[in-house]
Image (cartoon, grey):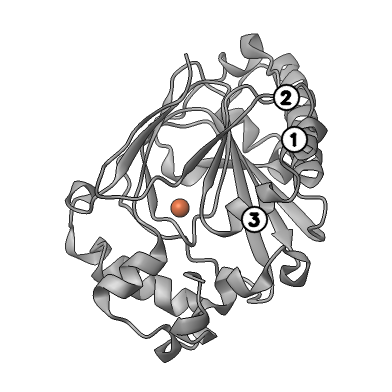
Amino acid sequence: MLTHIILNPDVEDNFVHLNSHKTFDGYYQEYGDSLAQQYETGQALIMDAPPIKGNDELLLDIEFPYNHRPTKKLKFRDIMSNDDATIRKFIKNGTAIKAFRNEASRVSNLMCKGLCAMFPKYNVLKSSIAWRFSVSHTEDLHLDVHSVNKDVHILKAYWNADSFPRIWQTGTHIENIIKKLDIDPRRFDHSEHLTAYLNKTYFGLSQGRVPSEVPHHTAIIAPGTMWIAHGELVPHTVMFGRRMVSVALHVEPKTMINPKLSFYRLAHTPPKSSLAQ
Ligand SMILES: [Fe+2]
């Protein structure tokens, strides 16, 4: 099956389906820096058949822990650690642990190298990788808030490593929300304060508001699909998902195609020179 987007006519279409290529370099050869340009303006890049082939026999055999909250993510460093305590919550068999470590290392490296090939101008300071092997469902629609160094941009990419689709919802671009609510971004010292404010007031995370009250698209993301999305600009939520690998590249903003569009500057940028231009 292919990823299918149920578009809401009240929300702009912020999905771009990329033609498939046998290598990550192939995507850059076809699209060049428009990949970065589109990503930076909040388009979600969908790769229906990315050059990643997982070991399904191994990955689909990994157990889901029932009490998933404390073990929601397996960080790459925990997977590779000699201490088996964390990994044993998912995998009991010692031979499978070794095979999983090899597979995690192979896929993680492939995704990181692949993203660097698609965004060759970005100076990547470091990467962090998490393998999610627990059921995710019905979060609240939100914008990501990163509590890291303000001069680092975090690019996130995901790979659906499950045999079931992952279901996401996405809303309208943050710029449209700012306009709708008539907010002056300059009143916030940091972009994180702006997103935290919107999460609380517009998405109503603290008021038990259901995500369906905010207009949204629904993306049914097929198994094996990879997607790259700017979670600080475009509100999103997972409605259902199982096995997934996520990669976060920490990018030096000045190496981006248009650092002025980078989210970390939004709160300091006068509205007239903001993302709409
Ligand atoms: Fe998020």
Q: Secondary structure at mark 2?
A: loop
Left or right: 37 with respect to 216?
right
Q: Is tag 1's residue or tag 3's residue first in the polypeptide sequence?
A: 1
Question: Against 133, is 157 above or below?
Answer: below
Question: Residue 55: horizontal and vertical position, in percent?
Answer: 69, 14
* Nearer mark to the viewer, of 2 and 1: 1
Question: Residue 120: horizontal and vertical position, in percent?
Answer: 82, 50
Residue highlighted by disc 3: 37
Q: Secondary structure at mark 1?
A: helix
Question: Alpha-carbon neighbours of circle 3 within 10 Å: few (<14), some, or many (≥20)?
Answer: some
Residue 131 can be seen in this image = no
User: Disc 1 and disc 3: Cα gap in Å?
Assistant: 14 Å
Left or right: 49 with respect to 271?
right
Residue at 61% across / 43% down in the picture?
A: 157
Query: Is the CB of the residue bearing disc 2 within 8 angstroms of ligand 1?
Result: no
Q: Is tag 3's residue or tag 2's residue first in the polypeptide sequence?
A: 2
Q: Label 1 near label 2: C-beta < 8 Å?
A: yes
Residue highlighted by disc 1: 30
Question: Alpha-carbon neighbours of circle 1 within 10 Å: few (<14), some, or many (≥20)?
Answer: some
Question: Residue 73: horizontal and vertical position, in percent?
Answer: 55, 42
Residue 21, labelled with which disc?
A: 2
